[in-house]
Image (tube, rainbow, N blue to C red):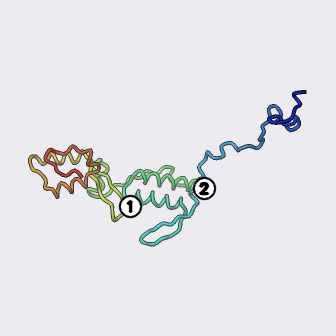
Amino acid sequence: MEEDAVGYARPPKTSRFRKGQSGNPKGRPRNRRREIPYDGLLGQMVTVREDGRERRVTAAEAFLLQLTQKGLAGDSTAARASLEAIETARAKTSNEYVGPTKIVWKAVGSGADGILDTLDLARLKYPTDEARVRWEINPWVVEAALARLGGRQLSFEEQREVWKSARTPEKVRWPDWWTVRH
């Protein structure tokens, strides 16, 4: 009979797959690679430099340290995220923890620094790097300040300083007399 023939693409009947049965019964586990390996990633040891000294901490601790540092520097989003992470960690480690169920914290600095970001006048750039930290003025503030000058024009050095301090200088509508473009 032709059906019993054995050869290319026709294995013996005894070793053929049964109807409805997979050829690889164990197969690849479902959803095996869909979840992020948080434990593996956050459990890795990394080197952190604080005050000129290096120390080894887990990636999770380094992440929380950075979030906290940004929060203390005035980044309210980072502060909120670090407080939520602390709350979550406390809830996981101790179900008996009795404390506030929700912490609301808003960092407001003193003087002009505390209000510049709140009023969207400027953004703090490199808040965690003492050597490079600086405020960058938003384009609309630069335009308003230049309009207040009236007929007075800034010197070349003053123009360069304003250009470097603008957050996105290419978006500012500079006056006709303006010469600095880089």
Q: Report the residue at 68% width, 42% height from top.
A: 30
Q: Is residue 84 above or below residue 53?
A: above
Horizontal side of residue 145 vs 115, given as left or right: left
In terms of secondary structure, where does tag 2 sit? helix
In terms of secondary structure, where does tag 1 sit? loop
Horizontal side of residue 148 vs 98, given as left or right: left
Q: Quadrant of residue 98?
A: bottom right
The residue carrying mark 1 is 128
Q: Residue 162 at x, y = what percent?
A: 21, 54
Q: Quadrant of residue 26?
A: top right
Horizontal side of residue 15 vs 124, given as left or right: right
Q: Residue 34 at x, y = what percent?
A: 61, 45
Callout 2: few (<14), some (14-19), or many (20+) C-alpha neighbours within 10 Å? few
The residue carrying mark 2 is 39
In the current view of this chain or complex, which residue is farthest to the right? Answer: 1
Q: Earlier in the sequence, mark 1 or mark 2?
A: 2
Q: Is residue 159 above or below residue 10?
A: below
Q: Report the residue at 28% width, 53% height from top.
A: 136
Q: Residue 37 at x, y = what percent?
A: 60, 52
Q: Nearer the viewer, residue 3 or 102?
A: 3
- Kindly identify the amino acid type of the residue bearing the numbered disc 1: Thr
Callout 1: few (<14), some (14-19), or many (20+) C-alpha neighbours within 10 Å? some
Q: Which mark is residue 74?
A: none
Q: Report the residue at 65% width, 43% height from top.
A: 31
Q: Quadrant of residue 114?
A: bottom left
Q: Nearer the viewer, residue 48 or 119?
A: 48
- Kindly identify the amino acid type of the residue bearing the numbered disc 2: Asp
